[in-house]
Amino acid sequence: MTTSSTLMGFVHRRRRGAELFLLVLALAVGVGGYAAVGVGVEGKVPADIIGYGGWLAALIVAAHIVIRLVAPYADPVLLPLVATLNGLGLAVIHRIDLGYAARGRETSFAQQQLVWMTLGVVLFVAALVVLRDHRVLARFTYTIGFGAIILLMLPLLPFFEPINGARIWIQLGGLSFQPGEVAKVMLVVAFAGYLVLHRDALALAGRRLLFVDLPRGRDLGPILAMWLVSLGILVFQRDLGSSLLFFGLFLVMLYVATERPGWIVVGGTLFLGGALAAWKTLGHVQDRVDIWLHPFEYYRNAQPPFSDQIVEAQFGFGWGGLIGRGFGEGDPTRVTYAESDFIMAAIGEELGLTAVIAVLLCYGLIVERALRVALISRDSFGKLMATGLASIFAVQVFVVIGGVTRLIPLTGLTTPFLSYGGSSLVANWVIIALLLRISDQARRPVPDLSADEEESDDESTQVIKL
C-alpha cells in the first residue's frame, strides 16, 4: 500500500549535514571578520582570536547538536543565516569599539554583545527542549496576549525614566531591558491563536467597493483595537518604530488568515489616517519627517532637531562605494549609535554596497525560509505563527534599513542579529527556535498507518471466520 507520506508528495530529509557545512562557512565569516578588524585597525590579529573564535564556535555547535537531538527535521538554513549575521555583527561592533578607543572613549560593546548572544543561544536551546509541540501555545492565547499588553505598558510607569525621549526601556539597577522585544513574540502567538478561532467570521464579506469586498462593520473591532494600541505607543512611548511594527504585523497576519484584500484597504486607510494625524499633532513625528525631507538644513544645528546621524550615514555610504575601503579605512564612530541603530551605515562605509546587499540577501532568505515553513505547516496555528514571525523580520528590517538609507523617516529600531542590544538579540534567537520547532513538525514524515490498518483488517477477517 502507498504510505501517507508518499501521498503528500515527498518525504523531507533531515539535512543536518548540510546545516553543519553552512555553519562552518558562517563561522568563517564571524571569526574571519573579527581577525580582519584587528589587522585593518591595529595591524595585527587580535590576541584573543582563539578564545573568541572558540567560544563563538562552541555556541553555534551546541545549537546545532540540540537541533540534531530534538528537532532533526527542522529547516537546515535558518541557523547558518542567523550565525552569519550575528558573527558579522560582533565583528563590526568590535570595529566600532576600537574606533571609540581611538577617540579616547573606552567601550566594551562587543564583549557585552557576546554575553547577550550566549544568553540568546541558551534560551534558544531551552525553547527547543521544553517546547516539543508549538500547538501547545494555542491553549494560552489570551493569557499570552494579556501578558504582552502588560509588558508594553510597563515602561509608562512613573519610576522608569525615558531614554533619548522614548519610554520603551525598563532600568533595574545597572541593567536595562526593552519589554517590547519580548512582547512582539508574544503578540504573534496571541494573534495566531485569536485568528484561528475567529477567521471564519472575519473572512465574511461586507460591502463591495471598486472590486474589493470590504469587511463587515461589526468585524472591525480587532483591527481598530490594534490601531489604537499602535497610536498609544506612538503618542505615550514616542516609539515610531514599534508602532509601525505591531500594526503592520497584525495587518499581515489578518490578511493571511482571511485572504480578504478588503482588510489591506481598511488597514492601509487607518495607517495613512493615523500617520497624517501624528504628523500634524506630534512634535517628535514632525521633526522626524522634516529631517527626512531636508536633512542638510538641520545638519550640525545649534538646537534640535538634529540630522547629524542621517547626514553622516549618507557620507559613510558614499565613502564606502561599491566594494568598501576595508576595516580601518573609515570612521563609523562619526555616526551616533553606530553600534546599534546605524550599524548598517558602518557596514556600508567600510565594506561597501556589496556587503549591504549581502546582508539584505541574508534577511531575505530568513523571511523566505520562514514563509516556506508556513506553507508546509500542517496546522493553521503553525501557519499563522510562522507567517507572523517572518513578518517581524520583514517589517523590522524594512523600517530600520529604510530609515538609515533615507527611504522612509528614521524610526530607531535595531537591525536583527547585527545591532548591539541584548533585548533584541535574545528575543530574535527565541523567534528562530520557534520557527525551527514549527519547521520540524511540518517536515517530519507522517506516521505510516497502513501497517496498523492491514493488521486490523486481518484481525477482523479472523473474527468473521470464527
Image: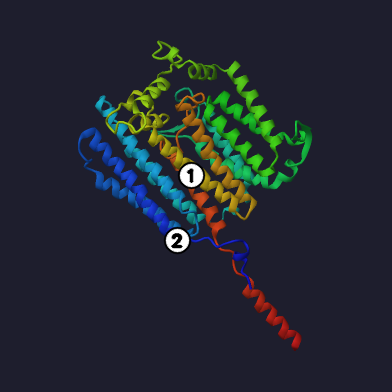
Residue that mark 1 sits on: 365
Q: Quarter of the image containing the N terminus?
A: bottom right
Q: In this view of the protein, can residue 224 be seen by the observer? A: no
User: Considering depth in this image, is 107 or 257 the residue closer to the camera?
Assistant: 257
Give the distance between the C-alpha atoms of the residues marked 2 and 1, in whole angstroms.
25 Å
Disc ID at residue 24:
none
Q: Earlier in the sequence, mark 2 or mark 1?
A: 2
Q: Residue furthest right?
A: 207
Binning the other alpha carbons within 10 Å of mark 2 as few (below 14), some (14 to 19) or many (20 upward) gives few
Left or right, 138 with respect to 303, comes to right
Residue at left offset 62%, top offset 31%: 229
Indicate whether 356 appears above or below 453. Answer: above
Does residue 413 appear in the picture of this structure? Answer: yes
Foreground disc of the pair 2, 1: 1
Callout 1 amino acid: Leu
Question: x, y percentage for residue 376?
Answer: 59, 53
Q: Secondary structure at mark 2?
A: helix
Q: Which residue is identified by label 2?
A: 69
Residue drawn 50% across the image and 30% down it: 168
